[in-house]
Image: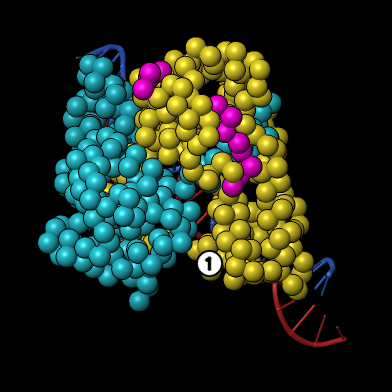
Chain colours: A cyan, B yellow, C blue, D red
Amino acid sequence: MQQEKKPNTPSTAVIKRLARYYRYLRTLHEEGVTKINSKDFSELMNVTSSQIRQDLNCFGGFGQQGYGYNIEYLLGKIGEILGVNEQYRAIIIGIGRLGQAIASSAVFAKRGVSVCGLFDISDSVIGKTVAGIEVRHPDELERFISENKVDIAVLTLTAKEAHRVAETVNALGVNAFWNFTSTEIKLNNPSALVENVHMGDSLMTLCYQIRHNSEEGSNAQ
Amino acid sequence: MQQEKKPNTPSTAVIKRLARYYRYLRTLHEEGVTKINSKDFSELMNVTSSQIRQDLNCFGGFGQQGYGYNIEYLLGKIGEILGVNEQYRAIIIGIGRLGQAIASSAVFAKRGVSVCGLFDISDSVIGKTVAGIEVRHPDELERFISENKVDIAVLTLTAKEAHRVAETVNALGVNAFWNFTSTEIKLNNPSALVENVHMGDSLMTLCYQIRHNSEEGSNAQ
DNA sequence: TAGATTGTTAATCGATTAACAATC
DNA sequence: TAGATTGTTAATCGATTAACAATC
């Protein structure tokens, strides 16, 4: 099988940085800044200006020599690359405190993703409304997914149930998972996409830094 | 100034992987597995066995030729490296839904970090008890930090307030920040540590993948 | 036009992988 | 001891940076 990679597939690192640029550029845009050059931007982002130009030029020339980058235009282009206009739809599985927090947050709307369904096994939340959406029992997943376009399943349930539920939902046709559990989700389906938010790993990284870098320090990245 | 780097400082990438190994090894340990070799482990973790051996050998020889790694021993060693036994103490600033979710989660206890204080400006939560801890007004930060050892400030407040509050808390002696806001925290203090959980960036990465990799797929890492 | 700054190629650097000798 | 698997060095690969020609 051994899928051949397109020659110029940008690395994950580039995409992560693009998302970061996007976030920052939006702030600048809100503040009324209209243009920026790679040097000034690189200082704000703590990367080299070379890297910014390289990253952007993976996807095309969005700047203008002698001028820099028009922020509004650049925002549009990066948004396009990252799929902000794709109107993806997500369901959240596991409506505990974290699920509720995420359901209620602006993170989806800001990226053009809409939450269309909430699911939980607990009677204490089923039927309740969170962020304007009714919480359903997972038994309804099959019908719900067949009747609604669902692109992303957000996994905010317990680690133990996560894998089984992900398999089920994947079998129903949902191919992308935003995983907040501490488990690694490994699906048989090779086209399934999993993006992890492993908070625990992040916390441990910080603890490591406290212990080792405390004398050196760094608030880069 | 230009701080000199110690020659063999392991890269952030190594530390992140170590945290990931740690998480996975604990699961294996709970399942009663006592030993593992780099090859088997590499298949579980979707990395090469070379990488696992390299990563571990940044810190010392934790294995035994011809045998592999004793999981309990390895867990202890990685835990030590990552500072699990340091008994770090954290305060959470911003007790909205996300702050409450994190305060109530097992993420701290599992990594040897204890939450000792909660702060929020809103009267609707001040005085209430979340995860067994009383929520206080930020006015009390100064006294609280002077009376308690506080290693980490978790930022789950709004992006707008985040920077100012971080400056204040840093001035009071807290040097490590676990940042959940969409802002980049840039402190004047060069020894301040900031670890970001940028959920929005993560979601965008997923959206990018949906749009571009859908035909190729990958649930690696 | 002259100045500025991009787009892009080439050089450097670091991280990953492969290979194998050491050793349990 | 023989077999297995680590620890570690050397080779490869990819990502970052530097440099500069193109061009607005």
Identity of the residue drawn at 23% across and 50% down: A127
Image quarter of the C terminus of chain B: bottom left
Label 1, secondary structure: give it: helix
Q: Quadrant of residue D9?
A: bottom right
Of all chains, the one bearing label 1 is: B
Identity of the residue drawn at 69% across and 69% down: B35
Image quarter of the N terminus of chain B: top right
Of A93 and B57, the residue lying toward us:
A93
Identity of the residue drawn at 53% across and 44% down: B107
Q: Quadrant of residue A63?
A: top left
Residue A178 seen by the camera: no
Q: In the rendering, at what x and y percent does residue A120 appear?
A: 31, 55
Q: Quadrant of residue B142?
A: top right
- Relative to residue A92, is residue A163 depicted above or below? below
Identity of the residue drawn at 67% across and 41% down: B83
Horizontal side, residue B178 vs residue A178: left or right: right
Of A193 and A70, the residue lying toward us:
A193
Q: In the rendering, at what x and y percent does residue A11 appear?
A: 38, 50
Q: In the rendering, at what x and y percent does residue A151 appear?
A: 22, 56
Query: Which residue is outermost to the left?
Result: A147
Q: Is residue B112 magenta?
A: yes
Q: In the rendering, at what x and y percent does residue B113 appear?
A: 61, 38
- Relative to residue C21, is residue A13 depicted above or below? above
Of B89 and A207, the residue lying toward us:
B89
Horizontal side, residue A163 vs residue B207: left or right: right
Q: Is residue A36 magenta?
A: no
For disc 1, the marked residue is B44
Which stretch is magenta?
B110-124
Q: Amino acid at mark 1?
A: Leu
